[in-house]
């Protein structure tokens, strides 16, 4: 069996999200890094007022939540993803986990993205060009963790330019939900974990639509079941873990690493 990390988009934002992150050392470290790296800190970014009125608050909160949840699983629970996928803005957290962006680089990029959207001085296509110009200044790093691009639904492996193109285009293009789900299935990952603050994506993927996870795959939300149960789910521990999709005994993966 293998695990995919899913990073939700802005639809998952909710007040207090940064104050409900996993209570682990790795999660606390991410919050401390964000507090130091974001002007003015992040303690008040997840209030209802801030999320309603500030693109910067929405962007930074979503990034911090996704990275903190992922690092809690990886560093504290020793759950290693075999693939990542980000929906829209969630792609930046996915790129951090894939090793293509450092956390400070991602913070700078999402603040720029938020500022472009708040000013609304250019059409979406031009905003994508602006983001591409910024991301062109970021060093390219080799990556071996498959990254499923939200704007194309293509699984990228060893293609940092393709990942950065996806991040830039995400400001202007919608997520191709069906293609993303199909690409994730093709990686062979049979246990999908939605990172904080997401809940709706898990429920959506477990539905009966064209982009449902399908047989042999289970999906859970860290926000719903907690970090410890999410880790047990990733390791194949049954018991009280509640997920969506096929049953624990009905996985089709063979334990091999996913391929694009």
Image: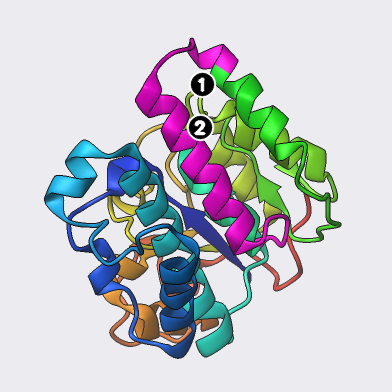
Q: Quadrant of residue 27?
A: bottom left
> Sequence-wise, which precedes: disc 1 or disc 2?
1
Q: Looking at the figure, which quarter contains the N terminus?
A: bottom right
Task: Give the main secondary structure of the magenta stretch.
Answer: helix
Find the residue positioned furthest to the top.
Answer: 123
Residue visible at 32% across and 59% down?
A: 197
Q: Residue sitting at 63 percent across and 76 percent down?
A: 80
The answer to whether residue 150 is seen in the rendering is yes
Q: Closer to the observer: label 1 or label 2?
A: 1
Which one is in front, 83 or 162? 162
Residue at the disc numbered 2 = 178
User: In the depicted view, which residue is nearer to us: 59 or 35?
Assistant: 35
- Residue at 24% x, 72% y is 19
State left or right for residue 225 relative to residue 94.
left
Residue range of the region highlighted in magenta in the rendering: 98-126
x and y, in percent, of residue 61 in the image: 35, 55
* Circle 2 Cα neighbour tier, 10 Å, few/some/many (<14 / 14–19 / ≥20): some
Relative to 62, residue 181 above or below: above
Residue 199, by quadrant, is: bottom left
Q: Does the stretch in magenta take in 216? A: no
What element does badge 1 sit on? Answer: loop
Residue to which mark 1 is pinned: 172
For label 2, the SS is: helix
Is any atom of residue 216 visible in this view?
no
Toward the viewer: 256 or 228?
228
Q: Position of residue 24 (x, y in %)?
A: 40, 87
Q: Is residue 141 above or below residue 118?
A: below
In the image, taking residue 28 as reference, residue 82 lies left or right, namely right
124 with respect to 60 (left or right)? right
């Amino acid at each position: 069996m293998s695990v995919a990390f899913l990073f939700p988009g802005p639809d998952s934002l909710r007040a207090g999200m940064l104050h409900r992150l996993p209570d682990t050392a790795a999660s606390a470290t991410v919050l401390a890094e964000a507090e130091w790296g974001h002007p003015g800190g992040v303690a008040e970014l997840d209030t209802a007022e801030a999320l309603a009125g500030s693109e910067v608050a929405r962007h930074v909160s979503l990034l911090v939540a996704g990275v903190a949840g992922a690092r809690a699983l990886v560093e504290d629970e020793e759950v290693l993803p075999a693939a990542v996928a980000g929906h829209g803005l969630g792609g930046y957290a996915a790129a951090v986990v894939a090793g293509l962006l450092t956390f400070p680089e991602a913070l700078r990029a999402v603040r720029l993205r938020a500022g472009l959207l708040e000013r609304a001085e250019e059409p979406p296509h031009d905003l994508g060009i602006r983001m591409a110009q910024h991301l062109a200044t970021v060093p390219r790093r080799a990556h071996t963790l498959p990254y499923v691009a939200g704007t194309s639904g293509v699984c990228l492996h060893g293609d940092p330019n393709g990942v950065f193109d996806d991040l830039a285009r995400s400001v202007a293009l919608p997520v191709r939900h069906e293609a993303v789900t199909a690409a994730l299935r093709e990686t062979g990952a049979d246990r999908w974990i939605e990172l904080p603050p997401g809940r709706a994506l898990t429920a959506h993927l477990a539905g009966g639509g064209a982009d449902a996870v399908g047989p042999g795959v289970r999906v859970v939300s860290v926000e719903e079941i907690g970090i410890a149960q999410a880790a047990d789910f990733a390791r194949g521990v049954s018991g009280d873990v509640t997920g969506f999709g096929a049953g624990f005994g009905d996985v089709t993966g063979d334990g091999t690493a996913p391929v694009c």
